Image: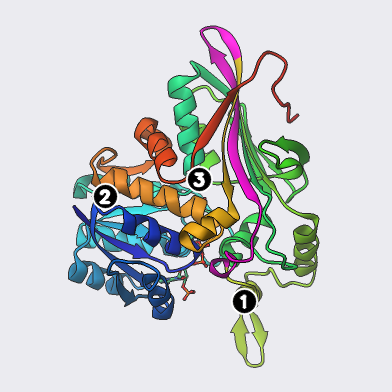
Amino acid sequence: MAKLLIIGAGGVGGVVVHKCARMTDVFSEICLASRSIEKCHKIASQIDRPIRVEALDADQVSQTVQLLRDFKPDLVIHVALPYQDLHIMDACLEAGVHYLDTANYEPLEEAKFCYKWQWDYRARFEEAGLMALLGSGFDPGVTNVFCAHALKHHFDEIHTVDIIDCNAGDHGLPFATNFNPEINIREVTAKGKFFKEGSWIETEPLSEQRVFDFPEGIGKKEMFLMYHEELESLSQNIPGIQQMRFWMTFSQEYLTHLRVLENVGMTRIDPVEYQGQKIVPLQFLKSVLPEPSNLGELTEGKTCIGCLIHGIQDGVKKDYYIYNVCDHQESFKEVKSQAISYTTGVPAAIGARLMVQSKWMRRGVFNLEELDPDPFMEALNEYGLPWKEIIFKEGEAPRIG
Ligand code: NDP
């Protein structure tokens, strides 16, 4: 049995607490710590077993170390913000605790993310006999495991991967983001980038657009090419990969609001002078936008996230699609959150479960595709994110172009 510290009491944190609290066979005690303790209390009050709550500023390494030494968890699930990744990894090394997150490190003052900063911790985690599991959400996370599963069971060589993320849900509000608004807007307004034949090709933000016909009644939606962090690790870990891209759907209403906000300077991340003090426009914007954790009751519809993969098996070309469909209202009924938080929180809980069960425990820093996909794929079906796979007959696979 293991003791678990969860950091971050937002939309994803709520789902992680709900899911881990039900895993009574592996987690003996759970503590939830976040910047605002009221949010921890609110989540803890929804759970029918005791959850310890603590106020914590995880940017302060010494505060986190103090909590780790006091509570003595075996593992930290970090679902606060990417800015805290390195601070929490430092604290875990100091206190001798395993680490898991769902998003790679991003410096506050620059809208840029890459794994280098966290991969640089490999030797230190190895020497300390600890594990850090990076990006155990849906994308990154499940999409990485989908690729590992495809490579293990369906292909001798994978040539192209298109990761396709569709949120066909509707919260009825003119503009809201389904995960942390600051991180979401930094990601969506960044340049696109994809991997092709050993190089990275950059595109203007949201300039590449296609239509994809999504399964299970979702139908045709416009999707846009973006850069996403799993492309970085997967392009290194899938031998012989020729092309890898990431696509996300957005409604016209979301795009129109975003364009206006950008045009008037509200998505800027550099400080501006306002009434004698410095404020960052995007941080101010976040404070007036709806919180992802409050969208659960409002959101209807489904998400569909998956990988369209092309390659070779037994010398024959193969087209394959693997995906999960998740229903916003079903998620809300189960854990009081919308499906984006749900599809992120469940894989975090599964990753933690596999680590403390020793099925995935290794020394060092790992992305999910480096580990055996089988127990994770099995757990997805068991813990609420069932997946489906389609092997297309020749000529029937959707072509993205
Ligand atoms: P929210 O904004 O809903 O929650 C973030 C929480 O972290 C808030 O409770 C916030 O506290 C807390 N927090 C922020 N800074 C600190 C700090 N310094 N110390 C302690 N707590 C802090 O975000 P989400 O739940 O939507 O997202 C959580 C994480 O999940 C993000 O990193 C996001 O990028 C990632 N994510 C990953 C996905 C994937 O598929 N891999 C998909 C979606 C999200 P307060 O409320 O007081 O500000």
Report whether the residue tagged 2 is closer than 8 Å to ligand 1: no
Q: Residue at x 43, y 69 (%)?
A: 9
Q: Left or right? Give the position of 295 relative to 145.
A: right
Report whether the residue tagged 3 is closer than 8 Å to ligand 1: yes
Q: Considering the numbered disc 2 on the image, is that residue within a helix, a strand or a loop?
A: helix
Magenta includes 2?
no
Q: Residue at x 73, y 31 (%)?
A: 400
Q: Which residue is mark 1?
A: 280
Q: What segment is highlighted magenta in the picture?
A: 292-317
Image quadrant in which you'd find residue 203? top right
Q: Residue 124 got which mark?
A: 2
Q: Left or right? Give the position of 60 relative to 317.
A: left
From this viewpoint, is residue 104 visible? no
Q: How is the image coloured?
A: rainbow
Q: Which residue is mark 3?
A: 140
| Front residue of 337 and 58 | 337
From this viewpoint, is residue 181 visible? yes
Q: Earlier in the sequence, mark 1 or mark 2?
A: 2
| Front residue of 291 and 298 | 298
